[in-house]
Image (spheres, rainbow, N blue to C red):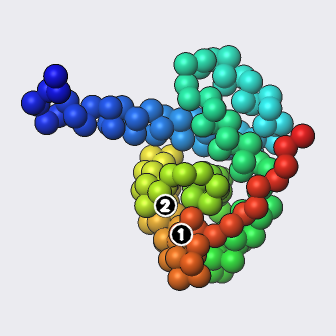
Amino acid sequence: MPSSTPGRALAPAVHAMTHRRRARQLALQILFQTDLGKFPIEDVLAAHRAERPREDWPFITSLCAGVTDRRKALDEVISKHLIDWTLDRLAAVDRNVLRMALFEMRQMDTPATVVINEAVELAKTYGGEESGRFVNGILGTIYRESTRAGNAGAGEVKPRARK
């Protein structure tokens, strides 16, 4: 029999949100490490998986491998929206949050508004003082442009065949 307590009905949704948030945090750490340290993504994924085997590795691996595989296309989209900046000048956290969020908006089933909100929270937590506003501005602009163009998923970065 269903519980009459309103909070009980939300518990699975809240758990799923925090579960995915933790997964995104770990994915960001992995992408940051590969971006700055120039380590192969497979090595960094394996090291983190060994340390934290209970995480959502299918989701984390999809994000990390997807961003890595499509990095050039993602960077081109992001670069088009930077005014008086280059991608290399961005803080590494902001750069990787943008890449990860753009990939998730375009290639995964997560609603764009959820992706943007999660990206802003990551930027606020791990980035600089203005990171949240900056990430929100860039992703919001990309999303609005894509919806005007008829791409609800924020445009297309075509999947690359895996070997």
Q: What residue is at 66 percent from the left and 22 percent from the top? A: 49
Instruction: List the single residue furthest toward the front.
Output: 1
Whether residue 148 sits left or right of residue 162 in the image: it is: left
Whether residue 26 sits left or right of residue 7 in the image: it is: right
Within-10-Å neighbours for mark 2: few <14, some 14–19, many 20+: many
x%, y% of residue 86?
72, 71
Say how many tags the image has.
2
The answer to which of 38 and 142 lies nearer the viewer is 142
Q: Which residue is mark 1?
A: 152
Q: What residue is at 80 percent from the left and 28 percent from the top? A: 43
Whether residue 148 sits left or right of residue 124 in the image: it is: right
Q: What residue is at 53 percent from the left and 69 percent from the top? A: 152
Position of residue 119 relative to residue 37, above or below, is: below
Answer yes or no: is residue 145 visible: no
Q: Which residue is mark 2?
A: 112
Answer yes or no: is residue 43 visible: yes
- Looking at the rendered structure, the kind of residue marked 1 is Ala
x%, y% of residue 95?
64, 58
User: Marks 1/2: CA distance?
Assistant: 8 Å
- Looking at the rendered structure, the kind of residue marked 2 is Ala
x%, y% of residue 3?
14, 26
Whether residue 129 sits left or right of residue 79 in the image: it is: left
Marks 1,2: beta carbons within 8 A? yes
In the structure shown, which secondary structural element does the residue marked by tag 2 occupy?
helix
The answer to which of 12 and 4 lies nearer the viewer is 4
In the structure shown, which secondary structural element does the residue marked by tag 1 occupy?
loop
The answer to which of 35 and 78 lies nearer the viewer is 78
Within-10-Å neighbours for mark 1: few <14, some 14–19, many 20+: some
Q: Nearer the viewer, mark 1 or mark 2?
A: 1
* Quadrant of image for the N terminus: top left
